[in-house]
Amino acid sequence: MKACSYLAVAIGALAVALAIGGCGVASGPAPGVGVPPPTATPAPAKRLYADHNGVLYEYALPLRAASKPVHSWNEWPGLGLAPAVTVDSFTGRVALASPKSIRIFYPPIRSFAKSHARTAITLTPAITQVGVNGADLVDLEYDPNGDLWLFNNLGAGISELRAPLSPSSIAALSLQFGAPGSKTAGFTTLVQGRFDINSTLYVYALSSTRGLLFKIGFPYARPPGTTGLNLNQANFIDSSQWSPTAPVQPSLIVGQYFGQLSSPPPGSPPPPPVNVLGEFLLPLNPQIGLFPNSHTNAIVGALAADPLRTRLYTLDSVRGTLNVYALPLPNRAKPALSLACPAGSNCSFKPEHLFLAP
């Protein structure tokens, strides 16, 4: 997933007050009956993948102060740019995408050379919009059913490849963002997509003045709503995903938040927005204000929630530090553990991702 943390920082100077009204999208053909969302959650993660600008580092879990990557790979040898990347948290499959094609690798990962790919798919107009130089895939994402979703900034289009993936796969569903006259008009820059355990798709998209997190519920036949949040790197924790011994088991959303922390006193102007790592209790309640219940002053390029270990992993956008926080996130929390960026000097404001894998 090509999570562009620098975009979240760049829009800070342009951002305005959050829009809480409804927003929608012009969608392609409905997916028909589709596949019902699974009820299972992934097995406890044994690995954490950290991506820094086209190099993937594997850490063994649980992380410790002396932890170092046990493996590292160039994700697409010879490509010359960082590919889009995602990991299936149920199976550990890794999907990589260049502007021309997709490669699927199965664990145990030995190499990301083309010869090691289990499946290779050439990108065509039957899959996603393709220009002279190929597609402009800014993100890939597996949903809980193992389907692969492509987020393309050529035409701000989202397409779904249904499992099982094969070289002859074509898009089973297409969604369009930013179309004139639609409720998402103006939101033509896609940044990333995320799924919760109910297969609801959340899309973080940018207009010329702000970012907004849109919500598209399974089976994706209706236009999306909006969370009302300018929230990048959104991760979702359902109450069922905590360990039975966890002292609290709330449903949460956590991510890089741009906005206000509270309502101003009566008669006072609104305070300037902040850019922080924020946590929100679910369901969101617009009637009391969409403000984080806790936050910490950090700007992260990627994050991954691990409720079974009550841990939140983040990559610092500036230093590339791999930080570990308690989960739920205490207010103004400090990292319980920090590991230096393994990429040395190639860490600041690069495309970054974090993935949990079995």
Image: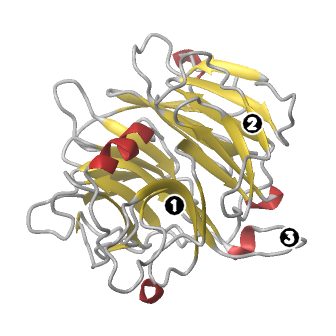
Q: Residue at x 64, y 33 (%)?
A: 50
How far across and how far down the image is residue 140, in percent?
Answer: 45, 43
User: Can you say whether 39 is above or below 106 in the image?
Assistant: below
How far across and how far down the image is residue 138, in percent?
Answer: 36, 39
User: Can you say whether 269 is above or below 174 in the image?
Assistant: below
Front residue of 92 and 325: 325
The label on residue 338 is 2
Front residue of 65 and 147: 65
Q: Residue at x 57, y 47 (%)?
A: 298
The label on residue 195 is 1
Q: Is residue 111 visible to us here?
A: no
Q: Amino acid at mark 1?
A: Phe
Question: Which comes before the other along the chain, label 2 or label 1?
Answer: 1
Q: CA distance from mark 1 to mark 3?
A: 23 Å
Q: Residue at x 72, y 39 (%)?
A: 48
Question: Which comes before the other along the chain, label 2 or label 3?
Answer: 3
How far across and how far down the image is residue 321, in percent?
Answer: 65, 32
Q: Quadrant of the C terminus?
A: top right
Question: Which comes before the other along the chain, label 1 or label 3?
Answer: 1
The label on residue 275 is none
Q: Where does label 3 land, which residue?
A: 246
Does residue 312 appear left or right of residue 143 in this picture? right
Q: CA distance from mark 2 to mark 3?
A: 23 Å
Front residue of 37 and 46: 46
Q: Residue at x 28, y 35 (%)?
A: 136
Q: Is residue 18 visible to us here?
A: yes
